């Protein structure tokens, strides 16, 4: 059964999986594999990284591209790293992958947006907003990692990167469907990387809403009405919206991945 969950449930599920014995670096490696399998990589590839674990997923992607002799460049926008992100960033440095601190995205063919993750909420700071505007102004194909940078993972709201494809990691969040309906996401992919859902969820492509914890944002009714989603409870309307966008949603699973230590 495919599911929609809240950002908090995803965070708790991730923490529980790590506590059960799965290394966090292994989960990051699996996320990077999902990204690698999500695109026809070609041309000038810019991996635009922030400071968190989303950036770490991007560093794994850079290593996988390098392993397959596909050139790429890391645009490092922060001097801060998560512990796992720092591990893979150091490997990128050791492999000689090009790393810059700014770029003109007008020459990019593919931009990988791994600036901000699902934990972000609120307003973008001016420097980050400027960076998002540069990405949106580029003619490049844009792939967002887990969530479009600037988008609220529960509500789909916020000024954000507008992606051609967003690759969700683990389980789809409520904001993904709302962002897809609002036209902020072109194609939505989700990769199951072995993190069981531990909490409330809304079943996708079903009418069962019994275990749902979805709280609609203020913009919800207007968004549903504008998209022509039939009336009903908020949870049921969200299910109907996903059904309407079903052809734009893909699911995959990462299995038999080997070890991150082979990178």
Image (cartoon, grey):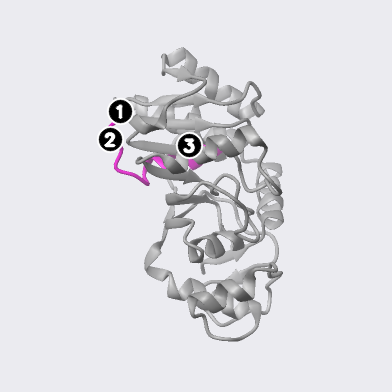
Upstream in sequence: badge 1 or badge 2: 2
* Up/down of 52 relative to 120, above or below: above
The residue wearing badge 2 is 42
Q: Please state if 42 lies on the left or on the right of 171 as rendered.
A: left
Location of residue 171 in the rendering, given as x and y in whole percent from the top left corner: 56, 57
Which one is nearer the viewer's eye here, 18 or 188? 188
In x, y percent, where is residue 240? 51, 78
Residue at 54% from the left image edge and 35% from the top image edge: 131
Q: Nearer the viewer, residue 255 or 12?
A: 12
Quarter occupied by the C terminus: top left
Which SS class for mark 3?
A: helix
Tell which tag, 1 or 2, sits nearer the viewer: 2
To which quarter of the image does residue 213 belong? Answer: bottom right
Q: Which residue is mark 3?
A: 134
Q: Which segment did they paint magenta?
A: 28-43
Neighbour tally class for label 1: few under 14, some 14-19, many 20 plus, Cα within 10 Å: some
Q: Which label lies toward us, 1 or 3?
A: 3
Assess whether mark 2 and mark 1 are in contact (beta carbons under 8 angstroms).
yes
- Specify whether residue 140 is in view: yes
Q: Is residue 10 left or right of residue 245?
A: right
What percent of the width, then of the height, locates residue 42?
28, 35
Does the segment drawn in magenta span residue 214?
A: no
Kindly report which numbered mark, 3 or 2, lies closer to the viewer in this rendering. 3
Say left or right for 46 vs 240: left
Distance, label 1 to label 3, CA atoms, is 24 Å
Residue indicated by mark 1: 70
């Amino acid at each position: 059964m495919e599911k929609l969950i809240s950002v908090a449930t995803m965070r708790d599920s991730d923490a529980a999986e790590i506590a059960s014995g799965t290394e966090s670096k292994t989960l990051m490696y699996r996320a990077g594999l999902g990204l690698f399998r999500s695109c026809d990589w070609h041309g000038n590839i810019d991996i635009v990284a922030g400071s968190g674990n989303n950036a770490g997923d991007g560093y794994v992607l850079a290593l996988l591209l390098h392993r397959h002799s596909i050139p790429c460049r890391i645009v490092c926008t922060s001097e801060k790293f998560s512990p796992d992100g720092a591990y893979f960033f150091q490997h990128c440095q050791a492999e000689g992958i090009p790393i810059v601190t700014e770029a003109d995205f007008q020459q990019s063919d593919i931009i990988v947006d791994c600036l901000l993750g699902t934990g972000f909420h609120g307003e973008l700071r001016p420097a980050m907003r400027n960076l998002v505007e540069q990405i949106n102004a580029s003619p490049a194909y844009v792939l967002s990692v887990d969530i479009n940078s600037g988008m609220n993972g529960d509500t789909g709201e916020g000024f954000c990167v507008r992606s051609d494809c967003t690759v969700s990691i683990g389980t789809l969040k409520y904001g993904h469907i709302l962002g897809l309906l609002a036209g902020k996401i072109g194609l939505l992919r989700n990769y199951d990387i072995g993190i069981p859902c531990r909490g409330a969820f809304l079943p996708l492509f079903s009418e069962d809403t019994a275990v749902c914890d979805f709280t609609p944002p203020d913009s919800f009714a207007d968004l549903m009405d504008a998209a022509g989603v039939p009336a009903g409870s908020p949870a049921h309307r969200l299910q109907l919206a996903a059904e309407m966008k079903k052809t734009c949603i893909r699911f995959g699973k990462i299995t038999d991945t080997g070890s991150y230590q082979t990178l």
